[in-house]
Image (cartoon, rainbow, N blue to C red):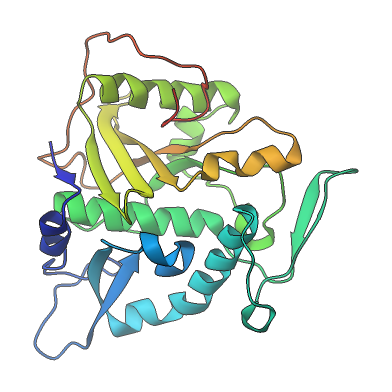
Amino acid sequence: MPIIRTQQDLRLAQNLPFCYLCGKAFNSRDIVNRDHLPPSTLFDKEDRDPPLILPTHKSCNSHEHISDELLGQFFTYFRGKTQKPRSRRLDIVDDLKTNKTFSLSQSFDLHHFIVRCLRGFHAALYWEWLPEKMDNAIHPPIRGGKLDGATRRPTDKLQEMLVKDAGVSQHALLCGILKKNRVARNTDRVVTRNGKCTFECIWTHLDNGTPVSVFGIKIYEWQCFDQRFGYPSRGCVGIYSPPSGRPRNGTKSTALEFPFTNDNELDPFGS
């Protein structure tokens, strides 16, 4: 099973022969850039090493800069950290006493960020391109507020096939699959940013035979973000289906039963 967690593993990922964003192979005429994934703005200075760095075309990666800044300030706010007023692009106003909602001065797409992480982790683990327009169903770690541009939900075929009610039961099911396979030491994994970012996935299929990856992503304690709005904590979990099917070295979900603790059914990395 592929695992990326050492500096040597992470350095190897920098040698990808293609841009993980557009999928095209590099040639001698390309201007190659490097994308730190997830972006460094999300992490404290002491947690920025070792990073996952993937090669991209400069033109492919250039438009993500402002989005990365907004994400960093979003994380700063929800982690209870202070930020310098002069550098602040994102103003957040919340109302915990009435509607338990919040608003942002600028919009950003949290779903797009998670998909971007998926594409990078997939490329690093399996050395193959994952297109942005793929079938996926993602449960983000926050539901207690409106993210403006980030409120978009997937409406593809996979969403229709798998997530009928898009509710708690589906989220808990995916978390349980990951927890069982983790106990069996049966997950593909990326660990980076001083252990403050973890991605895990396993491969299975739907009843109709469609191959899917069940995944979870943890960045700091973002499963607790929802608690400030009075909701139970929940992590980030979901599924995606590459057009090319399961990678050759993608680890299949175990068919055996392994007991695991499950005090929080909505956190794929919790006990």
In this view of the protein, which residue sits in the foreground, 170 or 133?
Answer: 170
Image coordinates for residue 231, horizontal then vertical, percent = 70, 33
In this view of the protein, which residue sits in the foreground, 213 or 35?
Answer: 35
Image coordinates for residue 38, horizontal then vertical, percent = 38, 61
Residue at the location (51% across, 17% down)?
A: 263
Residue at the location (11% across, 68% down)?
A: 15
Image coordinates for residue 236, horizontal then vertical, percent = 48, 40
Looking at the image, is 226 positioned above or below residue 72? above
Residue 145 visible here: yes
Looking at the image, is 141 positioned above or below residue 160? below
Q: Is residue 162 left or right of residue 253?
A: right
Looking at the image, is 162 positioned above or below residue 237? above
Examine the image and state in which quarter residue 52 appears: bottom left
Image coordinates for residue 132, horizontal then vertical, percent = 37, 59
Q: Which quarter of the figure is the C terminus placed in?
A: top left
Q: How many marks?
A: 0
Residue at the location (10% across, 40% down)?
A: 248
Q: Which quarter of the figure is the N terminus placed in?
A: top left
